[in-house]
Structures are given as structure tokens and as C-alpha cells.
Amino acid sequence: MTMIKKLLTTAIATTLMAGAAQAEISNDMVKIGYLADMSGTYRDLAGPNGLIALEMAVADVGGQVNGKKIEIVSADDRNSPDVASSTARRWVENDNVDMIAGLVASSVSIAVSDILEESGKLGIVSGSAASSITNEHCTPNHIHYVYDTYPLANGTASAIVKEGGKTWFILAADYAFGHALEADVTKVVEANGGEVIGNIRHPFPTPDFSSFILQAQGSGADVVALANAGADTTNAITTAGEFGLTQSGQTLAALLLFLTDVHALGAEAAQGIQLTTGWYWDMNADARAWSDRFMEETGVRPTMVHAGIYSSTIQYLNAVKATGSDEAQAVRKQMIATPINDMFATNGRIREDGRMVHDMYLAQVKTPAESTNEWDLYNIVRTIPAEEAFRPLSESQCPLVTSK
Amino acid sequence: MSMILGVPVAVLFGQLLLGLINGGFYALLSLGLAVIFGLLKIINFAHGALYMLGAMATVILFDTLGISYWAALFVAPILVGCVGVAIEYFLLRKIAGQDHIYSLLLTFGVALIIQGVLTNMYGVSGLRYSMPDVFKGGMNLGFMFLPYYRAWVIVIALLVCFGTWFMIEKTKLGAYLRAGTEDSQLMQGFGINVPLLVSLTFGFGVMLAAFAGALAAPIYSVTPVMGSHILIVVFAVVVIGGMGSISGAIITGILMGVVEGLTKTFYPPASSAVIFLVMVVVLLVRPSGLFGKEA
């Protein structure tokens, strides 16, 4: 009897304590883990400069929330889901990390989100492209902030079809991301009355694109679309320039191109290319002002991923402040309830499935004559409204949405 | 238009030509490796990093000192060759006579350090390098548009490869080299400075890699990681040709460029694997390689 009584009281006491802890900031500190590619292909678009963006956000809220210190830890995921998983597990299980930020390679984000769900912690994905992260891979424990493959396909492809690019040849990286983007683009092209007349899946990475560019040229398609990323895209664009692809009347469409890629190519090689972006450093006064600060710290202009890391961290810390808690569900609920109006987005909002929806932008790379400095690279051609840009909830396969 | 296996003949010609051009790069790189292995028995895993260094040097020399492409074709290999001599003199010499695995691990470590330092300094997005004006544009061959630069690559790569082969196999200097590495004590007895010969040979192999790098700068993304992708392919080429065979490395390099080019036409997803498939088959049928001496 006494045994049972003891057990019961302990159980009740524990429950009460757990409840009490939920409304507080655990371990008297908010701990953020920055997990990203720090040395590989995606280093420049996120990497060490993303950590600086995160530190800027923490400094801007004063380094503490409700009197509790904010601490940052960081690690290189080496673009490996295995490395990322073991780091994330150690962080949430042993090191009291409350939120994981950064998250670049799509495979990494999907692996880490599973761990977050198991451990009940929160993650904010800023770098990944795959739209499946908030579709079939959605969890109640992560948010996908900056962009995904749905608007990339939607923005660029529909604009080009409407301009008269009816027949398409798609050059896709032969892995999950490339396949997803290829499928999304095909859908958009066909929905707008165009036709995909050929495609090639090239190995990742491919250093020499001459053979594929020659095949794309031979196809006679109006548009040659690149469904790849990073060095593959810049290599393909350079080779297309060398082989006179656009001079022979074909349009080159790069579906995922970061500011750092365009900067590496230069206005000369990249001029005229249309692309979809979630943010551009020179798009308005707020963005410009923040970019100037970022440039002072890093020496370069920020990509949309850097800006997203800053913005999402501020949103997160504000939510911790408002709820007085760092418990994932409380914070996520608060973040969903709060519209986002800052240097990154206007009227952005986080949906039930964890997708942050905001206006996306169709940009065109400036000509060398238009470009006034090495980072002055885009003309914003069109604003794609949030509702049009992202996959509508009605088409979602996310259980958080469909079970309702 | 006549077709072969569903591919128009004209397209096939184009792909064959491109394969030849890529083969030129493979030949230059595998030749350097073969010289270093064939004469010094060193497995140089830093070869990719030194190729990258050649490309980076070409870009950086232009950006900082305004050194033109033509000058860089000489200056970059000489600079990187000096790095190679330093690696041989300060590091590899210390483990001379040890098992192959030591030189492999040592050079692999050196490659990681070079790559890591440059990644920290320059990032991974790639450095900008414009094509020299003479090479802008190209010619219409009827079956394809051939950029002038690619034509130049195949010509110069073949010339350099042939020159190297000639020097090692047909001249007195080459005879000293081969003899010096075969029996260094005897050669030293004849008054030949063998350690110097070894340093210079390693430096020369490295220069070939850096030359390929300089040649690659105008057409490929110049990044600190560009060498790590190509290194493994080039090693496969050397194995197929027969470790240490000079002419084998050249012929196999060009051949593998063509095989890869054809795969890119008929079944693109396999194009990064096809060279390794060939390697497996060659190792099974002829373990010493196509042109290897010891059977």
C-alpha cells in the first residue's frame, strides 16, 4: 500500500514538475544548434556565413530572452544524413539544444526532422529545396522557411511558357532533388500548354556538361531547363555559353540558382537568365539595410538562405519571449499565430504543415551594362503572390493537414 | 538522316569529338600520375589537388597580377611544380623505401590540407575566369558547333602528351631517369645526382597536373574541390592503362574520354560509372592493365 502511495505521489509530483517546466525556459537557457554544410558544395549559400546571420539575430534580441541567456552551438553536417543525425541526436538528448537551425541538404533535413519529432524538439529548415519536407515528410516539429521546389518550378517555368517557350528539354541531376524538380517542372509546363520533348538525368556531380548541352542543342527545344544545383548549374551555364546555346535561339532556364552561384558566374556569363528566388538583398530598403550590416560582418552579400536564417531565428526568439517557454509545441503554435513582417517577408505566415508561405520573386540576371557592382545582379521582374507560389494545402499529403 | 542505335550519326560524331577532348584532360592527368608512379613508385593522391591548384593559380594570377592566360599556361605549372618539389623534398623523401600505402596516405593528407585551406579562403562557389578573346566563338562543323577553345585543348593536350612520352622513352635524359629509378646506387656511382632527379621527376608530374588545371580554368568552374572529383576517375584510367605505363596512360586517357562520351549519349545516368566498369573488367581479364608489362 505504502509502496503504491509512494509511486503515485512520485508520479503526480513528476507530472506537476513537467507541467511547470513546460511553461518555463528549460535549463535556464535557450540553446540553438546550427547544423549546416560548412565545407562542401553548399558552404557558400549557407555555411559559416549562415552562422553569422544566426549570431546577428541573437545579438539583436540582446543575447537573452526573459532574462535567460541564449547559447549557440554549431556543427558541420558534411551533407551527410548520417553525420547530421548523430549530431542532432547528441544535441537534443545530451546537450539540451532546444532548436536546430540551418539545415541545407534536403536529405539532411528529412533525417533530422525525424529525430526532432522523436525528441519533441523544434527545427527550422532554411536551406533545403525539396517540397516533400512539408508534404509527405512533414512533422509537428519542424518549419520550412525560405523556399522549396514547388515555387521554383512554378515561378520560372510558367513565366517562360507564357513568353512563348513551348517545347522543353530538361537536364536534371540524377538524385531525389533533381527528380522532384523535374516532375514539378513537367507538371507546370504541361499545365500551361507547353510540352517536354526530352530529358537527361546526369550524374551528380558532373564536371563536364558539353555532351549534355550538345544533346539539348540537338533537340531543337525552345527552352533548356536545368534542374540541378550549385557547381552543376554553374558548369552547365558556362558550357551553354561556350557552345552558343542562347545565340542559336534557345532559352536557358536555371530552376535553382543562388546569389552566390550568379556571383561566381558573373553578369557576363549569366545575363538574361530567369530564376525564382525567395528574397533578394536589394529588393527593398529593409532588405538593403540588413544586407549592409551582413556585408560588414562577412564581406559578401547574403543569399536568401542567410536572410531566412536571421528572420526565422528572430521569429523563434520572439515566440519564446511571448510564451515564456522554449517547449517546441508552445513555440510553434505561437509562431503559426504570428504573421511575419520584417526584412525577409511581408505578410509571411507559417501554415499548419510547417510551410512558411510568403511572396516569391521572378528575377532576371542583369546585363554587365546594367550591373553597377559585383553584387548588383538581379532585376525583380515579377512578384509571385504567396497563395500562387506554394503548394496549396488542398493538395497536401501532410497528415497534420489531411487528418483534420 | 542515318541513325545508329536510335542516335543520328551527326550527333554521334559530335559526341565522339567531345569525348576526345575530355580524353585529352584525362590523358594529361593520368600521364602525370603514371610518370610519378612509373618512375618513383609513389602513389600521388594529391594529384587532383595539384590540378586544382593549377586552375586556381591561373585565376588568381590574373586577378592579382594581371597575368594573361598565355603566360599562366607556363607560370602556373612552374609555381605548382615548385610546390610539388617541396612536397617531395620535405615530406615524401622522409618515407622513401616504405610501403606504397605510406606515400598514398601522406599525399592524401596533403591534398585535404590544400583543399581545406583554399576552401576557407575562397569558398566553394567558384572563381570567375573569362575565356581569352582569341578563343571566343567557334566553328560550325556541320554536325556540331565546336568552340575554338575545345579545339585548342585537344591539340595542345596531345602535343604535351606526345612530348612527354618522347622525352621519357626516346631521349638520353629519359634514359637517365629510368635507369636512376631502376638502380639508384649504380647511377649515383656514375656521377648522376639521383635525389635531384627524383625531385625533378615528381615536380614534372605535378606540372602536368597543373597544366591540365590551367587548361581547364576557362571552361570549368574553378573551385577548391574541383580536383577531388576527377582524381578517382584518373586513377581508374591509370589502372586500366597499366600502372606506370606512360604510353598506356595517354592512350587509355583518350579512350576513356570517348567511352564516357558515348555513354553520355546512349545512357547518361551510367556515365559516371562506366570507367569503373571498364576497370573491373580489365582487372579481371588482364590484372596488369591494358598496357602493363608484368603479366
Image (cartoon, grey):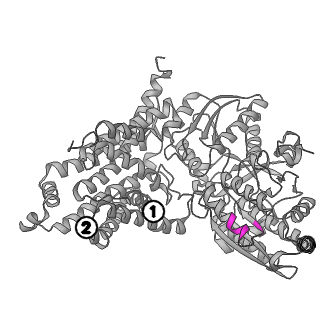
Q: Which image quadrant: the N terminus of chain A?
A: bottom right
**Which residue sits furthest left?**
B190
**To which residue does mark 1 refer?**
B62
Mark 1, Cα crowd under 10 Å, few <14 / some 14-19 / many 20+, is some
Q: CA distance from mark 1 to mark 2?
A: 37 Å
Position above or below: B137 against B80 = above
Is disc 1 in contact with disc 2, using a CB cutoff of under 8 Å?
no
Q: Nearer the viewer, residue B84 or B162?
A: B84
**Which residue sits furthest front?**
A1
Q: Residue at x 48, y 22 (%)?
A: B8
Does mark 2 fall on the same chain as mark 1? yes
Numbered disc in front, either 1 or 2: 2
- Left or right of A93? Residue A9 is right
Position above or below: A124 against B150 = below
Q: Residue at x 36, y 59 (%)?
A: B71
Q: Residue at x 13, y 57 (%)?
A: B179
Which amino acid, mark 1? Phe
Query: What x and y, as percent, mark residue A337?
Result: 93, 60
- Left or right of B288? Residue A167 is right
The label number, if any, that marks residue B96 in the structure image:
2
Position above or below: B102 against A158 = below
Q: Secondary structure at mark 1?
A: helix
Give the total number of marks visible in the rendering. Answer: 2
| Range drawn in magenta | A89-99
Chain under numbered label 2: B
Query: What x and y, as percent, mark residue A234?
Result: 57, 49
Counting residues from the start of the chain, the first of labels 1 and 2 encountered is 1
Query: What x and y, as percent, mark residue A134?
Result: 79, 49
- Left or right of A149? Residue B272 is left
* Residue B156 visible in this rendered orientation of the protein: no
